[in-house]
Image (cartoon, rainbow, N blue to C red):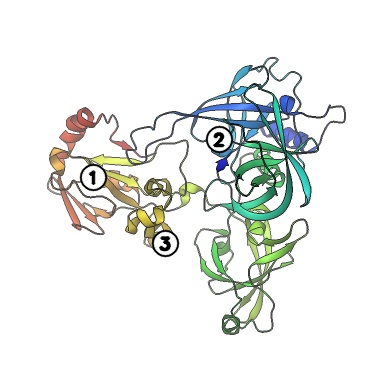
Amino acid sequence: MNFRFPFTASAVTLLALAAAVLTPSAAEAAPAPETSILRVNITSQGYNFALPWQKQRPGTRRGLGALLEGNRVLVTAELAQDATYIELEQAASGKRITAQVEAIDYEVNLATVVPVDAPGDFFKNMEPLVLDTGLKPRTALEVWQFEANGAPVTSTVDFDRVDLAPYFLEDQVFLIFQANGAVQYRSGTFTLPVIHEGKLAGMLLRYNARDQVSDILPAPMIENFLKDVAQAPYEGLPSFGVRIAPTLDPQLRSYLKLDKYEGGVLINSVTPGFSGAAAGVKEGDVIVEINGYKLDARGYYQDPSYGLLSLGHLLRGACKVGDVMKMKLIRDGQPLDVDVKMLRKEANEFLVDPYVFDRQPRYLILGGILFQELTTPYLQLAGKEWKDRAPFRLVYAQANQDDFLKSGRKKLVFISGVLPAPCTIGYERLSGLIVNKVNGKEITDLAALAEAVKLPENGIHRIEVTDGPRTIYIDDAQAKQDNEDFLPSRYRITEMEQLK
């Protein structure tokens, strides 16, 4: 059994938060579950990526949040995703207060929630937690939670390993602590605070009951998140933007002229718009050192706190936007020093959005033909094996975005389906087709499509796609009539487009 457990705040207030979280008050009593963690009850409602004008059915989640200085409660972004209503609840008394998301980062899977109104005496006699950022392996930790009646429950686990792993989004990997020991799972909990000597050591993300192994989002990552929130505007973590491969093969090392060098990893590709490309890093370069840390042939370095660790930590979790990374490269057998200024690429700046939360998917309907901008959540409708089950041409596009960006596209517009209507007779089975042109206009995103459909050719829309019929013809007058009368009454669609 396994279980998984917009920013509106002044810079001065958040800076005070970051300082308070890191420095305990000498006069405070020792924190305890009933005074330092709260139940967080959330109602959420996301959108339906197959029928983007509709919302999914509302759902509820319950987790535990760690109380921080300033009446802020730390939770995971996974718990707070698409939240429409949030309550903070004292486990023992059942007293509740309405709250809202203050800050959220889905990549590092962290969020803070705060009361909507003045909290009154809700936080009276409660004790904020401070962070313990100096943990090293071979340390005993406590996992806090509550019984259904509000009685505290404590499980002891042994922190013994550090690695990089996903927190929430499958393609985002960061520093993670792994601990051994049985966790007494109580139903209705989504995330669990992890404590070391009365301080917050992290948030338990996953627990494998069979192997009794816990994955913990560690305090150093929480510290970075809170510091970033305090220095508005929130920037998030940077990305290097390259694919790397080990250089263990002696023949490969000889080809790369690495015979006289130790270690190093090969750069297989460089993605435009990221830190590496902006700094002039090239495909075929070999990274041998980052900020004084030498890399072995697998891409690992000796971290002073955690031992052998992947270079991914240096390039994401251990740096922030604007930092300059000192890199030593080997290019054509010759050493080269490069300064890489770390940049961030927002999710909406990708050709295919890697994630979409808290907003409606973009779409446009023309007489029953449903156009969307491709997103990873749409592909994930095919299930856990979506890379094998989703339409091949769309999966290929998601994995090879550079090829489409070079052609001038900003987003990948495709036909996700056809609603049976008078003007789409014969086209009902079309889906998964990438749109190239409409009425002779290049389609770079949905905004371009919206402009193109204003200019039919002799009263006919000509839609050029990559596969299938290659060209689709739609009568403009019939499409307008269907959009105004047939589709709203038959499918209860109130808005024929969402471009924001």
Q: Indicate the amino acid at tag 3.
A: Asn
Q: Is residue 278 left or right of residue 16?
A: left
Q: Is residue 271 left or right of residue 95?
A: left
Front in this rendered view, residue 368 or 154: 154
- Calculate the distance from the C-alpha at mark 2 to the C-alpha at mark 3: 31 Å
Image coordinates of residue 139 in percent, x first then y, are: 78, 48
- Calculate the distance from the C-alpha at mark 3 to the C-alpha at mark 1: 28 Å
- Looking at the rendered image, the quarter that the C terminus falls into is top left
Q: Which residue is mark 2?
A: 79
Question: Can you see residue 499?
Answer: yes
Which residue shows up at 69% across the image and 54% down it?
162
Q: Which residue is mark 1?
A: 453
Q: Earlier in the sequence, mark 2 or mark 3?
A: 2
Q: Nearer the viewer, mark 2 or mark 1?
A: 2
Q: Earlier in the sequence, mark 2 or mark 1?
A: 2
How many numbered marks are there? 3
Q: Residues within 10 Å of mark 3 (few under 14, many from 20)?
A: few
Secondary element at image label 2: helix
Front in this rendered view, residue 456 or 208: 208
Q: Earlier in the sequence, mark 3 or mark 1?
A: 3
**Callout 2–callout 3 Cβ contact below 8 Å:** no
Q: Nearer the viewer, mark 3 or mark 1?
A: 3
The answer to which quarter of the image holds residue 231 is top right
- Calculate the distance from the C-alpha at mark 2 to the C-alpha at mark 1: 40 Å
Q: Which residue is mark 3?
A: 400
The answer to which quarter of the image holds residue 36 is top right
Which residue shows up at 57% across the image and 81% down it?
252
Residue most extreme to the top: 120
Q: Nearer the viewer, mark 2 or mark 3?
A: 2
Q: Indicate the amino acid at tag 1.
A: Val
Q: Indicate the amino acid at tag 2.
A: Leu
The answer to which quarter of the image holds residue 370 is top left
